[in-house]
Amino acid sequence: MPFKLLVIVSWSCFSLLLSQLQAAEKPNILFIAVDDMRCDLGCYGVQHVHSPNIDQLAASGVLFQRAYCQQAVCNPSRVSLMTGLRPDSTRVWDLVTDFRTTIPNAVTIPQHFRAHGYRAVAFGKIFHNTFPDDVSWDEPTHQAQNVARYSPANQQKLAKFKDQLREQGKPQDLIERLRGPATEIQEQPDEMNLDGRQALDAIEKMRTLSQQNQPFFLSVGYIRPHLPWITPKKYWDLYEREKIPLARNPFLPAGMPEVAFSQRSMGGFYELRGYMDYLEAPSPFDAALSETQQRELRHGYYASVSFVDAQIGLLLKSLRDLKLDQNTIVILWSDHGWKLGEHRSWCKQTNLEIDTHAPLIVRAPNAASNGKALSQLVEFIDIYPTLCELAGIAQPKELEGKSFAPLLRDASLPHKPAAISQFPRKHSGRDYMGYALRTENYRYIEWLDAETGEIFAQELYNQQEDPDENKNLAANSNIPTNAADTTHPNRVLLSSLSQQLWNTIPRPKFPLVLSNTANNDSQTNQPLTWHAGSDTKLPTANPKGAFKQASFVNETEDTVELWWQGADGSEKSYGKLAAGERFNIRTRPGAVWVVKDDSQKRLGFFVIEEGNFARVLGVIPQP
C-alpha cells in the first residue's frame, strides 16, 4: 500500500508539473477593448488623427481593414464578441439584458481560457459596464479609483441647470438622465482621468502576472472616446479646431426608410441629447448641428482618441520592458463605429457601414502576416475561435464564428463572402429587426416585422460607387422580394442578396419577441401582482437579494409614469410609458414600483417578488 500510494502521489505531482509546463509554454493574451472608437486612425489612412501608438501596433501586427461588429451598440456587441454567438443566439439586443439570464451556461472567452490554465484578469469595460460577469475572471473586474470626472465648475453648472428645468416643469425623467456638458478640457494629469489611472493599474498587474508560472489573459477596457469627451488639455492641443475636416455627408441617405433611424430613436441621436448643452439639438430628420457645434464635437472626439492612444502606448511599452512581447498575443478592438456628423447623426445604433465597421488589430508573435493590412471581411464573432487556435486550445463546438488565424499565416487566403450585423427598432408602435449583409460590393439591409416576419423595408448601398451610403438603391421596393409583379430595377439583385443573407444565418422564428422578457429554455416570465388604486397604503420597500430582470408593460390607453420607491420613502421617476410601451430594468425582490398618471395620481403599484425566475412581468391594466 505505501508503495502504491507513493506511485500515485508521484504520478499526480508529475501530472501537475507537466500541466504547469504546458501552460507556461502557451502565449499570453493582452486583450484591449476601446469604447465607441471608429476607424478614424492613422493606420486606417485618416491622417488628421494623432494615433501613433495604435499605428505602431498595426505596423507590427495585422490590421483588418474590414471588420464588423454584430450589433452597433455596447451590450449586444460585447456579449456577441465575448461568447462567439450572434445576437439572435444570445437574445441580447439592448443595454438592459444580462446575457446570464438568456444563456446562463454560456462560456465566455476568458472563462474558456481559465479552463485551459490561464489566469484571466480584467480592468475597466470589457463586458457592458452594468454586467461585469464575475464568473469570467479570476478576480472581480478592477475599476479605477480616486479619479475625477467633470470639474467642480461643470458639476455646479449641471445642478443649476437641473433646477431651472424643474422650475420650468420639465419631466422628472428628463432631468434625472441629464448629464453635464458633452465636452470638457481637463486641467489635470492623465492618471486623474479614469482611463489614465486604469492603464497604470493594469501595468502594475502585468508586472505581477509576469512573475507567475501561468499564462495570463489580461483584459483592459477603455471608456474614451465614449461620450462625454472630457480629457486633459494636451490632447486637445494636438488639433486645430478650424482645420478638422467635417463630415462629407451631413444628410440622411436618399430613399432611406424611416425605420432605419426611427423618428423616436433618431438613429441613436438621443444619446447626445442626454448632455446639458445638447438637450435641444435638432433631430437628424429636421436639421444638422451648427458648424460650431460640429467642430467642437469632432475636436472632443479626436482628443479622446489621442488620449486613449497614449494609454495604450504605455501598456505596450510595459509589455516590451517586461520582455513579454515575444510571447504575448495582442488584440485591440472597438465594440462598434460611431457617426461624427455623417447622416446628421452623432452616435452608433444603426445598420450602416459607419456604425458596424470598427477597428481590429491582432499581433501574434512571429506571424507571417505581421505588418500587413488585410481586406478580407471578418466578423467579431471570429475573434473567439481565432484566439483559441492561436493559443492551441480547443474551440467550443457552439461558436458561430470562423477563425481567421490562417490569415495571420497567409494573407492571401480567402475568409468569408459576407459579414452580418443587425439592429432592432421600435417604430410607429411596432417592433422590427433589421439584418445587414455586407458583401464585397454591397450592403443589403432587410427590415422584418417582428410579429409577422414579413419584409417591411429594404436598403441597398453600392459600396464601390457609394462608400458613404448616401443613396438607397432599394427605395420604393418595400415589398417582399419574391413578389412576382415587382418592377423594381434591382429586384433580381435584392432577391439574390436576401437569399444570401438567409443562407448565411438562420432565419429567425416569428413572432420574434425583442423584449428581454422573452421565454427561453431555462426560464419563464413570472407575472407580478398589480395592486390597483391610490387608497391602499404603500408597503415599505426592502430591496435585497439577486437582481431580477423586470419588464413593465403599459396596457392602458393613456400615458403613465413609472416611479421607484426607496426604502426611505423617497421616489425616483424612471420615465413615462406611452400606451403599449414597455420598460425593462434590473431590480431586486422587495423593490416597490409605483405607477402614476399625468396628474401624479397613483394608479397602483407592483412589488418585485422572490422566486426561482430571472424575469418578472408587470402589466399595467386598464383602470
Image (cartoon, rainbow, N blue to C red):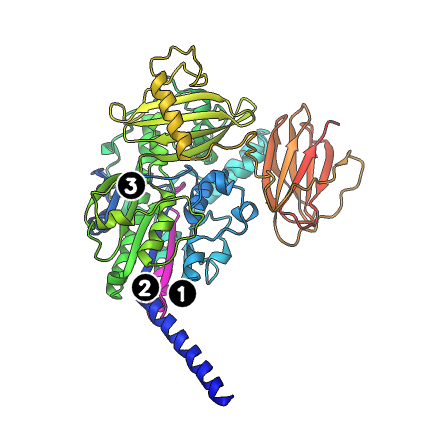
**Which residue occupies the foreground of this view, 569 or 95?**
95
Label 1 crowd bin: few (<14), some (14–19), many (20+), radius 10 Å: some
Q: Amino acid at mark 3?
A: His
**Which residue occupies the foreground of this view, 73 or 591?**
73
Judge depth for marks 1 and 3 and give the one in front. Answer: 3
Residue 379 visible to an observer of this rendering: yes
Mark linked to residue 415: 3
Q: Residue at x 71, y 40 (%)?
A: 528
Counting from the top left corner in percent of width and height, residue 327 is at 27, 62
Quadrant in the picture for the C terminus: top right
Q: Amino acid at mark 2?
A: Lys
Residue extending farthest bottom: 2
Q: Amino acid at mark 1?
A: Gly
Q: Is residue 221 magenta?
A: yes
Residue position marked by numbered label 1 in the rendering: 117
Residue position marked by numbered label 2 in the rendering: 26
Counting from the top left corner in percent of width and height, residue 43 is at 22, 43
Disc on the earlier residue, 3 or 2: 2
Residue 33 visible to an observer of this rendering: no
Q: Disc 2, disc 1: CB below 8 Å?
A: yes
Where disc 2 sits, the SS reads loop
- Which residues fall within the magenta stretch? 201-229
Q: Is residue 364 left or right of residue 551?
A: left
Judge depth for marks 3 and 2 and give the one in front. Answer: 3
